[in-house]
Image: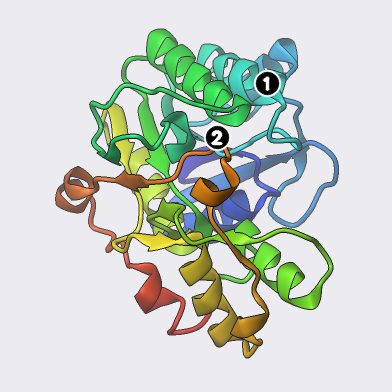
Amino acid sequence: MGRVLLVTGGSGSLGRRVMARAAAAGWDAVGTYVSAACATATVRLDIRDRDAVRRVVAAVRPDAIVHAAAGRDRNDWAATADGAAHVALAAAGVRLVHVSSDAVFSGRLGEYGEDAVPDPVYAYGAAKAAAETAVRAVDPSAAVVRTSLILGDGNGAHEILTRDLIAGRVRGALFTDEIRKPVHVDDLADALLELAAGDYAGVLNVAGADAVSRYDLGVLVARRDGLDETAIPAGSLAALGLARPADLRLRTGRARALLSVRLRGATEFVRSGRG
């Protein structure tokens, strides 16, 4: 039997990819779900339940944990913040890789390195910042991975939103002044697995190579999927006066030097198709 990896949120878009790629990286992976079991997630776990988290970790006895679970609602503080603390407490003595987000920042600085201090401007970012604080306080040896928009296999939230906007299934717009550094889900999954096998401690930015607007990213997705890019509604945070982070470019020099995985840019991996 190889090393055992516990993946919280193994039924989610990122968790499924971590599970799918774990065997090739030498792991026997166990995934958790909260509402519906699937091929990649067979252990039920509500991370809001501290005792349940402890029971699952004790039963699985993992060598490492990738905490990729999140609340079913982006404003679910109990899952996003408290849940991360529960996982960190239960993981005592176990290698922990915690997945965080560029949403911990306001976007006022534009570029953010690993030492940047979180200054969130909305509830989800505040919950992710609180989660980081809890994990680092409980387990200073944990790796805290800040990432950006995750896509590449067709199941990313931005990919789904782009298709829904074009089809008219939802109302809204993709903003031309909201800048991110999207990462391919496979690149991120491989980075998490590599970190699970290592000993890097602290924050690490793992994002794609290209800084693109949400609108331009939608155009790339539409072209890849053979959809009408002119049907994508465009908007501007500045024009609408919305209090959302505009420019969240994560500096990734440290990750590029540390990791063997190549963090591709969206203009490469979206245009080249899924996978």
Q: Residue furthest left?
A: 257
Can residue 84 be seen in this snapshot?
yes
Residue in the image at 65% along x and 15% along y: 54
- Callout 2 amino acid: Ala
What colouring method underlies this structural image?
A: rainbow
Q: Is residue 87 toward the left or the right of residue 25 in the image?
A: right
Q: Is residue 149 toward the left or the right of residue 234 in the image?
A: left
Residue 198 in picture, x, y percent from top left: 28, 38
Can residue 152 be seen in this snapshot?
no
Residue in the image at 78% along x and 60% along y: 171
The answer to whether the residue labelled 2 contacts the one labelled 1, judged by CB atoms less than 8 Å apart, is: no
For disc 1, the marked residue is 77
For disc 2, the marked residue is 243
Which of these two is toward me, 191 or 131? 131
Q: In the picture, residue 145 is in which quadrant?
A: top left
Disc 2 crowd rating (10 Å Cα; few below 14, some 14-19, many 20+) is few
SS class of the residue under badge 2? loop
Q: Residue furthest bottom?
A: 226
Real-space CA distance between mark 2 and mark 1, rounded to the nearest whole angstrom: 20 Å
In this picture, is 23 found above or below 12? below
Residue 7 in picture, x, y percent from top left: 58, 40
Residue in the image at 43% along x and 15% along y: 133
Q: Residue furthest front?
A: 239
Instruction: Residue 191: give its label.
Output: none
Which of these two is toward me, 52 or 221? 221
Q: Earlier in the sequence, mark 2 or mark 1?
A: 1
Disc 1 crowd rating (10 Å Cα; few below 14, some 14-19, many 20+) is many
